Each structure stands twice: as structure tokens, then as C-alpha cells.
Image (cartoon, grey):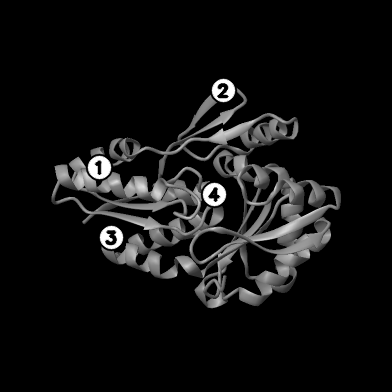
Amino acid sequence: MDYMIFADVSIDIDMAFADKYDLKYISMEYILDDNSFNCSRPENDEMMHQYYEKLRLKASTHTSQIVPNNYVEAFEGYIKEGKGILYISLSSGLSNTYESALLAAKMLKDDYPECEIEVVDSLGATGGMGILAESACLNREKGMSLSDNAKWLREHANNINFWFKVEDLMYLCRGGRVSATTAVVGTALKIKPILTIDSTGKLQTIDKKRGDKQAMLGLIERFEETYDPDMGNTVYVSCADCRDVAETLKSKLLEKHPDLDIKITMLSPIIGAHTGPDMLSLIYYGSKRKY
């Protein structure tokens, strides 16, 4: 069966690749001060630069949940054409989008009993969803069936490693990831937490570094411990409007691993609302997550 591949618009992905393989998106909304924006596809870098500049000026921002009917509207037209749906969701450990998509799939199967819909929990976010989406598109091109593709993605989701650091701890504080005391003291002491997405798809702080230089070295150390070239050489460096720092990280990685295919992307407003400006992440296929 012919099938379409969808992902949350919170994904960070190389747009040339996404356009080539006709990746589809589920739109999401975000609020900036008193204005609501519907994000129907990844924003361009200039738009994201303006967004993060406003956050640096202390604009308030938050996101809203995708409701099941959004998925129904996005999927139904293709189902009527006889196409299947493979949907890659933001981690169930970070959002309720996965549960909403499952509910939508049930609603559609009630109306179209013969339709084939696979909802895959990415157990990740940002560039990790990008890597999974790339794999899904390449699997489809090789002739892999919808069900086999979904099975492959689920089996390998935990091979995607995430390491990142944030600049402003107050964003994590607002999301309940760190305490207010930790945020205030950490900011004053220029403490940079190293975070990961664990095997259940939830955020976890695993280390703390003093200053940006040590934080970047911490990301590289984790990469060296877990990178598996046999699984692929694609690396995503997703950043929240700190491209110069991202380019430095890319250069350091290429010094030792010149065969890496490193893609720098701008973090979406959906995820950026929860991390703030100048977040830097390193995402790739490697050993199974141990956290």
C-alpha cells in the first residue's frame, strides 16, 4: 500500500531532504506575548532568529496541545485516496501528542475500517525526530511496507542519542524541570546542565558544567562514548539561534570524524518555548540509551 509519512511540526529536519521525500507535517500553535501563531511547516531561519530575539527581550511564550481532530483533518483526505499513514510523534514523555494521535487513528479506523495507520512514538524530539523521519523516508523508498517501517522505527528509536545544554535555566524552571533555587543559583554561577532524553522519552539532567566551553566538551565526550558509525553518519546539531556555537561544535566533531554528515538546524518555536534561546543539542544514531 502507498503511504504518506507525517511528523509533528516540532521536528528539526533538513528541509531539502524533507521536500524531496514529501514529508508532511501536523501543525502546532505557539503563543508569543499576546499573539497566537499557527506553525504548519518548519519556520525559516530568519523567522526563528526574530523569535529568539524576542525571547531574549523577555517576551513570554508557550505552546498548545494538538487535539485529535487536527490529525483527523490532516489524515482523512489521504485515507480517502486509499493511502496509508505513518506518523512520527513528539515523545510521549514530553507531550500528549502521541495519545491524541492514537485516539485520532481509532476514530478514523471506525469510519474507514480498511485504512492502515501507524502511530510511532519517537521517544525524542527536534533533530531526533528528523533522523527518524529521514530513516522512514529512505525505508519507504527501498520498498519497505508501512507496518514494517513502523516496526523498524520503534526498534531503533532508542538508538538515537540526545545531548544538549541550555543557556537560561529559568525556561527549564517554568517547565518544572529544575527548581527555582537551582535556576537562580545556577544562572549566577554560569552552571550549564547537560541534559538528555532518556529511554522513556523524558528529560533528564545527567551532568553540570561550569561555562559554555566545558559544556561543549561535555557534549563531545558523550558523543565519543556512544556514537555508532555502523548505524549511520547523520548528525543533527539543533540550536536556538546560536549558529556560531553550532558551527564550532561541528568543526570539533569533524576534526576527529571527517565522514560525519552534520546538519545544523534552527530549533523550532514549539521546543524553543521550553528551552529558551542559545540551546545547543547534539543528536545522532548510537548505542541504546542507558538512562
- Reading the image, the residue beneath label 2 is 35
* Mark 3 vs 1, N-terminal side: 1
Q: Which secondary structure, mark 2?
A: strand
Task: Identify which amino acid the numbered label 3 is placed on.
Answer: Leu
- Reading the image, the residue beneath label 4 is 12
* Mark 4 vs 2, N-terminal side: 4
Distance of mark 1 from mark 2, alpha carbons? 32 Å
* Vertical side of 263 occupied by 53: above or below: above
**Residue 259 in the image: x percent, y percent?**
63, 70
Disc 4: CA contacts within 10 A as few (<14), some (14-19) or many (>=20) = many
Q: Which secondary structure, mark 3?
A: helix
124 left or right of 140? right
* Mark 3 vs 2, N-terminal side: 2
**Residue 282 in the image: x percent, y percent?**
64, 60
Task: Identify which amino acid the numbered label 2 is placed on.
Answer: Asn
Which of the 4 image quarters holds residue 149?
A: bottom left
Point 15% across, 42% down: residue:
111
Q: Which secondary structure, mark 4?
A: loop
Task: Identify which amino acid the numbered label 4 is placed on.
Answer: Asp
- Reading the image, the residue beneath label 3 is 146
23 left or right of 253? left
